[in-house]
Image (cartoon, helix red, strand yellow):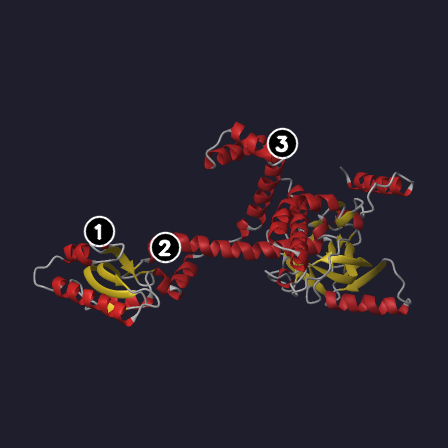
Amino acid sequence: MSYRARCFCVLAIAFCVLAGAPAPATSAAVTIERIIAKIDDDIIMLSELQDLVKPDAEKLRKSYRGEQLSRRIRELELAALDAMIQSKLIAKRASALELNVSEKEIENAVVDILRQNKTTTAGLRAFLDSQGMTMEQYRDELRKKLLARKVERMEVGGRVSVMEQEIADYYDAHSDDYREAEKRTVRQIFFPVSKGASASEIEAQRKKADLAYAEAAKPGADFAEVAEKHSEGPAGSRGGSLGSVKKGEVFPELEQLIFSTAKGGTSKPTRTRVGFHVVHVDDVAPGKVITLDRVSGKIRSKLFQEKFTKRRREWITDLKRAAFLEISYDPAPSADGLSSVFRDVREQISFRLVGVKLKQSGGRLFGQDRILWAYGANRDKPRWKSGRVKVGEGASVGKDAINALEAGHRLFVNPDPSANVYLFRYVYLLPDSYIGEVNFADMIKAFSERSKGEGGKAGSRTMSFETNNKAARLEFEVEVQKTRSIVADPKEITQ
């Protein structure tokens, strides 16, 4: 359903209520369907959010009550709404890149799911039916996930790499993680002492331990036979065998006893918090270093995932900044101070590039009739560059040519004041030639001063800004709107 059609449905529902539709028999409040978020020309309805969180909300209601339940549900809804917005932004990006998912890809995914879950198509249908979902709905959700994965592989994964030196550096910095600890094959004769045991009971267990030690320490004695004969521990029936023991696997007092006893040696009776132990060490396997070649694959995967996660956050941030986001769903702030995924943007300012005028110059090289611009805080490594745009008569680029580019490369919403727009000439077979730049901090300041001079009048304004070297002039449509927007910077969201 289109944005306009959905808005019409919401208005139609509201009209029916206002026009005197019969009121419900109970006096309970009735929630009327409404729009809770706008993402460019798309929307999210309240019912969509409620449907998404319903299963998890029901689980929360079984575990929490009162204010704690309200807070948990509020956090659930905020996180879910952010996920829905991300999903729509990713879908829009997929559309811009003309990506799609074929029926064959969906079929292959379903086959993989059946194999991994060791079930059949009938079994999957039965499960979906128990969840109130049809196979067609499931395939549609699967299509969205596969498409999102495809976009992320291209836009995020394709820009992430792990160098061999990074793997080696990580290995060196975490060398203790790549050592196999010493292992000892151990047997014990054990006499437990219960908590609160009397002095006479403790002494009786001590004497048993002394007698067992004396027998086990005799030349030629078989410790396993002595353990099976005397030990009162659970391992007694198997000759006192504790198997292979590494540091950290048993409590500290017993660990100290085991690792201070020589190979082939038998310890004297030792009291711990649980009783008396006589330990025999059958064998010692010394620790060793795991070589880099054995773990490089795991390290590569770990570093790749860390970089991918970081890059994805930056990518989502850029998608949010490039979109117009308006949130009308406003839950109360969390009682424990958990950062909300929303913030008030009382004056959301947007700069829409509509024209570029270059300074006339003679002696043009072939290919110089196209320009491009970049956005970011660094000219050599900007966040992105636009496509090349043909320069028309009078060394200028008009609104129509600029509008042919995707929105993210011509619309700057709440731009970073430290960022710039850099202009470049495209020169055939040569590196792009830098023309000049304009700074957003200067642009925002100029707009603010002009607004004050006009009495703070609302609405859009067309403003021109000259590059730092006077080589070009950029024309923007500048607009301020009062709105509530999703947080653009992932650092502002509690992770």
Name the residue tied to disc 3: 134
Query: Does residue 45 appear in this view?
Result: no
Determine which quarter of the picture holds residue 339.
bottom right
Amino acid under disc 3: Thr
Residue shown at 61% from the left, 57% from the top = 314
Name the residue tied to disc 1: 238
Residue situated in front as seen by the camera: 426 or 83: 83
Please state the horizontal and vertical placement of residue 326, each as a whole percent of the image: 76, 53
Front position among marks 2 and 3 = 3
Dot placed on the residue nearer the N-terminal end, 3 or 1: 3
Please state the horizontal and vertical placement of residue 359, each as a whole percent of the image: 76, 60
Location of the C terminus (image quadrant): bottom right
Front position among marks 2 and 1 = 1
User: Gap between marks 2 and 3, in whole Å?
Assistant: 44 Å
Q: Is residue 226 left or right of residue 181?
A: left
Name the residue tied to disc 2: 295
Dot placed on the residue nearer the N-terminal end, 2 or 3: 3
SS for dot 1: helix
CB contact under 8 Å: marks 2 and 1: no
Query: Does residue 72 appear in this view?
Result: yes
